[in-house]
Image: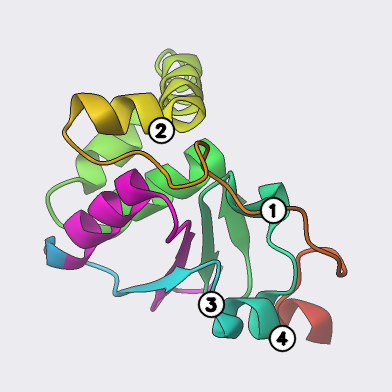
Amino acid sequence: MSVVRELTVLYDGACPLCVVCRDWLARAAQRIPLRLLDVHGEVVRSTYGRVPGDGVALVVVDDAGRYWLGPAAFLMCLWALERWAAVAWLALCAPLRPLTVASFALVSANRAALGSLLGVPSCESGHCGLPPSPGGPYRSARLAAR
C-alpha cells in the first residue's frame, strides 16, 4: 500500500458553493496537502481529460493516480484535514456509511438551494455542473501509464 503524499481536489469553479467549500479546504489545517483545481481549467482538461460526472461530482485524485468520486471524494477531503480525519473514519463505519452517502447526495443535488440558504449566490447558469464535453474517459498521466 502506497503512502498518500498529496491529494488533488477537482471542484466546479462555476459553482459559488463549491468555491466557498474550496476556500474552506484551503484555510483548514491539512495533514495531507490538498491541491485544489477548478474542473474548468486547462490543467484539469489536459491532465485528467473528461472529468466523470461533467463537474457534477466532486473528484479527488491521489499522487498514485487513484481517484474517488462524490461521497468517497468528500471523505478523502475530510481525511486530509487535521481536525476532520476522525469524522471521516467515523463516517466510513458500516452503520453510518449509508447516511454519509445519502447526505452527500442530497447536498450535491441541491448545491444552488443550499448555497442560497447560506447566502452564497446561485450558479450563473441556474444549475451546477459542466456542459457535456467531448473526450475520452477520465484519465490521468499516471493512470494512462498503468
Q: Which residue is mark 2?
A: 111
Mark 3 element type: loop
Looking at the picture, tell me which residue is in the foreground, 134 or 36: 134
Mark 4 element type: helix
- Per the model, the C-alpha gap separating discs 2 and 1 is 16 Å
Question: Which badge, 2 or 1, is on the more N-terminal residue?
Answer: 2
The answer to whether the residues at label 2 and label 1 have Cβ atoms under 8 Å apart is no
Measured from the top left, where is residue 19 in percent x and y?
31, 56
Q: Quadrant of residue 24?
A: bottom left
| Residue drawn at 78 percent across, 62 percent down | 133
Residue 137 vs 126, above or below: the answer is below
- Per the model, the C-alpha gap separating discs 3 and 4 is 17 Å
Q: Which residue is mark 1?
A: 131
Given the image, on which type of amino acid does mark 3 rest? Answer: Gly
Image quadrant for the N terminus? Answer: bottom right
Q: Which residue is mark 4?
A: 141
The answer to whether the residues at label 4 and label 1 have Cβ atoms under 8 Å apart is no
Question: Which badge, 3 or 1, is on the more N-terminal residue?
Answer: 3
Question: Which badge, 2 or 3, is on the more N-terminal residue?
Answer: 3
Q: Which residue is mark 3?
A: 41
Given the image, on which type of amino acid does mark 2 rest? Answer: Arg
| Residue drawn at 81 percent across, 87 percent down | 145
Q: Is residue 139 left or right of residue 98?
A: right
Residues rendered magenta in the picture: 1-26
Question: Which badge, 3 or 4, is on the more N-terminal residue?
Answer: 3
Comparing marks 3 and 1, which lies closer to the viewer? 1
| Residue drawn at 39 percent across, 76 percent down | 6
